[in-house]
Amino acid sequence: MDKGRLEAFSDAVIAIIITIMVLELRVPNETTLAALRGLGAVFFCYVLSFVHLGIYWNNHHHLIKAADRITGGVLWANLNLLFWLSLFPFATGWMGENDFAELPTAVYGAVLLLAAIAYYTLQTTIVAAQPDPTLDAALGRDLKGKLSPVIYALGIAMAFVSPWISIALYASVAFMWLGPDRRLEPLIDTGNARD
C-alpha cells in the first residue's frame, strides 16, 4: 500500500475526532462571563485532548514519512491506534461534564494509556517492516515513549486518590511531548525516506 494513502486516511480520522470533540462544546444560552465559567472543566478537557491528538498527529506524520515500507501488519496497527484515538471525544466529554470525577478521570487515563501502547505497537510494527535498520536507529531508546505509559498508569491509579493529581500527570506527558521530537526529521530532510 502507498504510505500516502495511510497518512491521508489517518489525518482524516484525526480531523474528524477533533471535530467531534469541538462539537461537544455546548454554547451557553446566556451572554455572561459566568456562563462561560461554567464551561471551564469541559473546555480544559478539550484543550488537553486537543494537545494530545496534535502530538499524535505530528509524530504519526513523521513516523509514516520516515517509513519505506507499509505492510498489512502496519495497517492493522494503525487502525488499532485510530480506534483508541477515536475514544478521545467520549472520554474527554465524560471527564469534563462530570468535573473530573474519579471514574471518568481514570477512564480518560485508560484511553490515553491504550493510545500510547497502540502508538508504540505501530512504531514497532513499522520498524520491523523496514528493509534496513535506519529507522530503528533513529528512534533510539525512545525514553519519552516508554515513560509516557508509566505516567498514564500512575495517573489512572491516582484518579481514585486525587483526580487533580491525575490531570497533572496527564498534562505532564503532553508537556513532555510538546517539544518537537526531532529524531526522525533527519531521515525525512535528507531524503532517506521515500514519499
Image (cartoon, grey):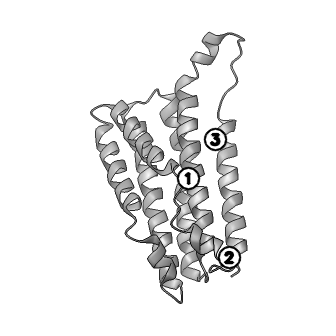
Instruction: Say which of 89 and 194 sits in front.
Output: 194
In the rendered structure, the answer to whether residue 21 lies left or right of residue 179 reads right
* Picture residue at 33% right of the left edge, 34% below the top: 165
Where does the image place residue 90, in percent across and percent down from the top left? 55, 43
Q: Distance between the residues labelled 3 and 1?
A: 16 Å
* Picture residue at 70% right of the left edge, 44% below the top: 19
Where does the image place residue 68, in percent across and percent down from the top left? 61, 82
Q: Name the residue under label 2.
A: 3
The three-letter code of the residue at mark 3 reads Met
> SS at mark 3?
helix
The three-letter code of the residue at mark 1 reads Ile
Q: Distance between the residues labelled 2 and 3?
A: 27 Å
On the rendered image, what quadrant is the N terminus found in?
bottom right
> SS at mark 1?
helix
Q: Mark 3 points at which residue?
A: 21
On the rendered image, what quadrant is the C terminus found in?
bottom right
| Figure check: 7 above or below 3 | above
Mark 3 or 1: the one toward you:
1
Instruction: Say which of 161 and 60 sits in front.
Output: 60
Where does the image place residue 120, in percent across and percent down from the top left? 45, 66
* Picture residue at 64% right of the left edge, 76% below the top: 190
Question: Image quarter for residue 192?
Answer: bottom right
Earlier along the polypeptide chain: callout 1 or callout 2? 2
> SS at mark 2?
helix
Q: Name the residue under label 1.
A: 55
Mark 2 or 3: the one toward you:
2
Earlier along the polypeptide chain: callout 2 or callout 3? 2
The three-letter code of the residue at mark 2 reads Lys
Q: How many labels does the image show?
A: 3
